[in-house]
Amino acid sequence: MSPVRFRSSCLASVLTTLLLVVPMAPAPASAQAVASSAPPAAPALAAAPAKARPIFVLNSLDASISVIDPRTFTELRRVPTGKEPHHLYLTPDDKSLMVANAQADSLTLIDPVSGEVQRTISGIADPYHLRFSPDMRWFVTASNRLDRIDVYRWLPADAAQPLKLAARVAASKTPSHLMIDSRSTTVYASLQDSNELIAIDLASQAPRWKIAVGKMPADLFLSGDDRTLLVALTGDEFVEAYDVSGAAPRLLKRIRTAAGAHAFRARGDGRRVLVSNRVANTISLIDLASLEVVESYPAPGGPDCMDLLADGKTLLTTSRWSRKLTVIDTEKKAVVRQVAVGRSPHGVWTLDHAPRR
């Protein structure tokens, strides 16, 4: 494990548990090796579109991106990045996939169609997690090891440096994940090692409020009406739901999912959201109206980030501790494919995705 406190998703105690439950798979024989396996009785995957764009997986401990063919589910190649790429996000013009290289203090911009590196933006301190505001004015990073949240102005006309620092906001211990409301007024951040949630006004870059939450908060998800904020508790087996529509947040419910609730992905229908349970090796589907778990899927190897293909049923998740991309058929509730990637795979993304709401 890296000596930096957050670098295997910041959870030493969770990592210890997972290593006991899920043995680490051996590394591929070569960085260019293509390896995949499927359960013997696995159902066939739906055919990908003829012009399907690649799937990208960030290999956090290998400083690389696995570029995967969605038709054959084989690794085509690996693209070098800066040290410790953890999360990724599409630029507002849809032309670049922005990879946050936390330990390298840089961003790598990738063509989301070809997978080619377009450029590197340096001088972005510790970008662990990242978000653009919907109005395309603000870019925000969670500087995990530096205990702060950095707010930048997005200036795409400035080709040399499109990001201009507006403010650095102190953030207790280990800011982890970010979420921005649809009106581009507020950024929410989980503070993993102080068990807190903070809200920051984007226009003034001033904190609005900060509250205590459950153990080791990680990813956040905000409902389409900006009222309900979900907080995944990786140190527990719950997702907490808060009403954030008023001056102060109000706890609505603690939703029992499974051990190690960690990352969210909207189901694409505006009504449900997926959460990966890293310790339990499952993914839960939460109904946003009832705030109840309505389905569960197997996800071996410490599931982390997710994406959902455009067919609406093929779910991708990075299996953090087994060095795999896991492919799940949500209709059959079964793992149908696993693809060997690099060490500590984290973010996963493709242009050919289902809606993100």
Image: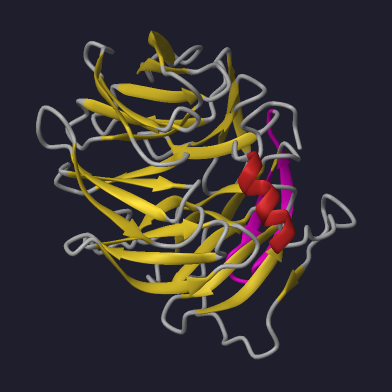
At 65% across and 53% down in the image, what residue appears? 320
Q: Does the image show residue 345?
A: no
Q: Is residue 310 or residue 113 the one in the foreground?
A: 310
Q: Is residue 168 above or below residue 99?
A: above
Please state if 313 lies on the left or on the right of 69 as rendered.
left
Please state if 176 lies on the left or on the right of 312 as rendered.
right
Q: Does the image show residue 276?
A: yes
Image quadrant occupied by the C terminus: bottom left
Q: Is residue 230 or residue 327 the one in the foreground?
A: 230
Residue 185 at x, y = what percent? 19, 25
Extreme residue in the left direction:
246
Occupied quadrant, residue 135: top left
At 61% across and 50% down in the image, what residue appears? 57
At 45% across and 50% down in the image, what residue appears? 263
Residue 315 at x, y = what percent? 48, 67
Q: Is residue 234 above or below residue 145?
A: below
Extreme residue in the bottom direction:
41
Residue 202 at x, y = what percent? 25, 19
Image quadrant occupied by the N terminus: top right
What residue span does the magenta drawing correspond to?
65-82
